[in-house]
Image: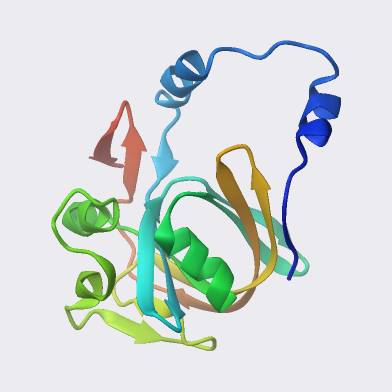
Amino acid sequence: MTTRPMPAQLTADILDGHDTVDSDRFREGMSRVAGAVHVVATRAASGRAGFTATAVTAVSDHPPSLLVCANAGSESARSVIEAGIFSVNTLAWDDEPLASVFAGRTELRGEARFDDDRWQTLETGAPILDGALVAFDCRVVSAEIVGTHHVVIGAVVGVRIGRGGRALVYRDRRFQGV
């Protein structure tokens, strides 16, 4: 696993002297893009931790790998990198209360977020949500800081295919079922 901040010079080289759009304008534009809602979870030395994420995508199917983006200021994101393992649990539309818990919209923090009996494990020991549409069990192979976020790539070592049904998505700054 490699973890290193992206040098400011590298960012400037990528932009090649071109200006970028204002951050507020960019966020407003991205609010129009629907994203599946996931809970990313880990088991670190300090206990279980997790966060809600929409910035999750497949990298490759050979070898199977996923990319997750997480706010660099998040304790849960740092726990993922520290532990070197994580799960990606894709939520069904009726899992909105759980998405709110892991988004920090409730008083629950840390280990208390995992108090119900819906959490199990697969290969790595990372928490896997029983009832997720699909759950991926991953080992961290790369973690880079890009701007304000960790970009984490995980090798998928286990998959649990869950129930079918409507997915929970986030669009226009609110949860929706599709």
Residue appearing at x 62%, y 58% in the figure? 152
| Vertical placement of residue 68 versus 122, above or below | above
* Whether residue 137 can be seen here: no
Q: Is residue 71 above or below residue 14?
A: below
**In this rendering, is residue 91 above or below 55?**
below
List x then y, in percent, for residue 31.
Answer: 40, 26
Residue visible at 59% across and 75% down in the picture? 84
Q: Nearer the viewer, residue 175 or 113?
A: 113
- Identify the residue at image location x=51%, y=72%: 86
The residue drawn where x is 37% and y is 70% is 49
In the displayed image of the protein, which residue is found farthest to the left?
Answer: 107
Q: Position of residue 122 (x, y in %)?
A: 47, 87
Q: Is residue 167 visible?
A: yes
Tell me how the rendering is colored.
Answer: rainbow
Image coordinates for residue 14, horizontal then vertical, percent: 82, 28
**Quadrant of the image containing the N terminus:** bottom right
Q: Is residue 10 left or right of residue 132?
A: right
Does residue 31 appear left or right of residue 119 in this picture? right
Count up the numbered dots: 0
Q: Nearer the viewer, residue 34 or 82?
A: 82
In the rendered image, the quadrant that contains the C terminus is top left
In the picture as drawn, the residue positioned furthest to the front comes out as 8
Q: Is residue 32 above or below residue 138?
A: above
The answer to whether 11 appears left or right of 66 in the picture is right
